[in-house]
Image (tube, helix red, strand yellow):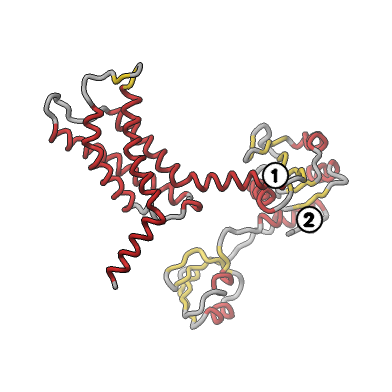
Amino acid sequence: MEQMKKENRVIKFIKNKGFILLLDIIAVNLAYIVALLLRFFVHGEFKVSVSYLDYFWKIAPFYTVGAIAVFFLFRLYGGLTQYAGLNDLNRIIKAHIVTTILHVVISIIVLAVIKKEHNIYRMPFSYYVIGAVLQFIYVTLIRFSRRIFMIEKAKIDSKRSSNVPAMIIGSGDLGQKVLHHLENNTLYKPVAIAGKDSGWMMDGVPVISMEEIESQIKENGVKAVFIADKDLSKEQRDHVRQVSEGLEVEDFTGYMSNQSGFLPLTNLLDVMDMPIVVDVDGKEQQFASAEECLSTLPGEYDVIKVQATKLVLKKREEDTSWMKVYQEQTGHEVSYF
């Protein structure tokens, strides 16, 4: 029975990851072949007295096995390529540091064993450097190309369906959040962002100065304006509303800045049905159930760490000072739409 499970796992791996494994085998060898070509291939022939290419083919089988083993060690075959992210990139970087050292060691050992005509102890230094860089690029593209394709396809599809020109006021973090929200979840097409970083681009959208808002609204046929800067002065807000008269104006400042980035305790406990231990400011408390925990702890908490069935909590401290300033300056209530 255990043998059948192992065989099934092997078959499943070959079916799901076999193609990536094959591409990796090609990549780790192609990278160093290209490195030799870039180093020695001039005017249609190798300009070198030593047959480094012959030496490479003797090194390749040992390095291929070693490199693939390192990739397995760093779990480069465990992720879903359509969701490849920063953690996957970190593992790729670590694996390539190891494989670069491994390639140097294997090449030195192989050359020490097979050297006959030439007193060669290692491959050229440029071969190692260029090969390592190319291998990193190839292996990274193998894992990230699908996600890059999906992201770009989604952007193209979104642009095709987006037909309402819009402008964002605010080029900071909130402005970027609103930009992504509009591009991914609405029919609005951001055509300009007004803020302090004028002259630059944010995700392909030009950033303009506050003084250019009116002219850009007319030039681009803007139909909607979204405010995403809690630091705007009263004069600036009045100016935006004045030049946007007759357009749809939404204030996303409150909605976007209300996102803390932590997981609320209530959201986690909704799906837990077991005795739990929580840690609040270094003091542990035990509860028989999630319901008891919710009814006992006063106030709102965010989960900052989960240790088995132990939750480390931090009392949520929400900065609402900007809301008072906003209401005093504008006379309007903060919108959370």
Q: Quadrant of residue 136?
A: top left
**Which comes before the other along the chain, label 1 or label 2?**
1
- The residue that appears at 47% across and 64% down in the rendered structure is 305
Q: Residue 331: give x, y in percent of width and height.
A: 83, 55
Seen in the picture, residue 36 relative to 178 is either above or below; the reply is above
Q: Are marks 1 and 2 in contact (CB under 8 Å)?
A: no
Q: Quadrant of residue 116?
A: top left
- The residue that appears at 51% across and 79% down in the rendered structure is 273
Which residue, given by chain and number where applicable, does mark 2 sit on? 327
Q: Quadrant of residue 266?
A: bottom right
Q: Residues within 10 Å of mark 1 (few under 14, many from 20)?
A: few
Q: Secondary structure at mark 2?
A: helix
Horizontal side, residue 139 vs residue 300: left or right: left
- Which tag is nearer the camera, tag 1 or tag 2? 1
Q: Tell me the quadrant of the picture where the N terminus can be found.
A: bottom left
Q: Residue 66: give x, y in percent of width and height.
A: 26, 46
Q: Secondary structure at mark 1?
A: helix
Q: Nearer the viewer, residue 105 or 18?
A: 18
Horizontal side, residue 156 vs residue 102: left or right: right
Amino acid of disc 1: Arg
Cα separation between marks 1 and 2:
38 Å
Q: Nearer the viewer, residue 264 or 28?
A: 28
Which residue, given by chain and number where applicable, does mark 1 sit on? 160
Q: Is residue 9 visible?
A: yes
Amino acid of disc 2: Gln
Q: Residue 158: give x, y in percent of width and height.
A: 67, 47
Q: Residue 181: give x, y in percent of width and height.
A: 67, 51
- The residue that appears at 28% across and 28% down in the rendered structure is 125
Q: Residue furthest right?
A: 246
Seen in the picture, residue 257 relative to 218 is either above or below; the reply is below
Q: Residues within 10 Å of mark 2 (few under 14, many from 20)?
A: few
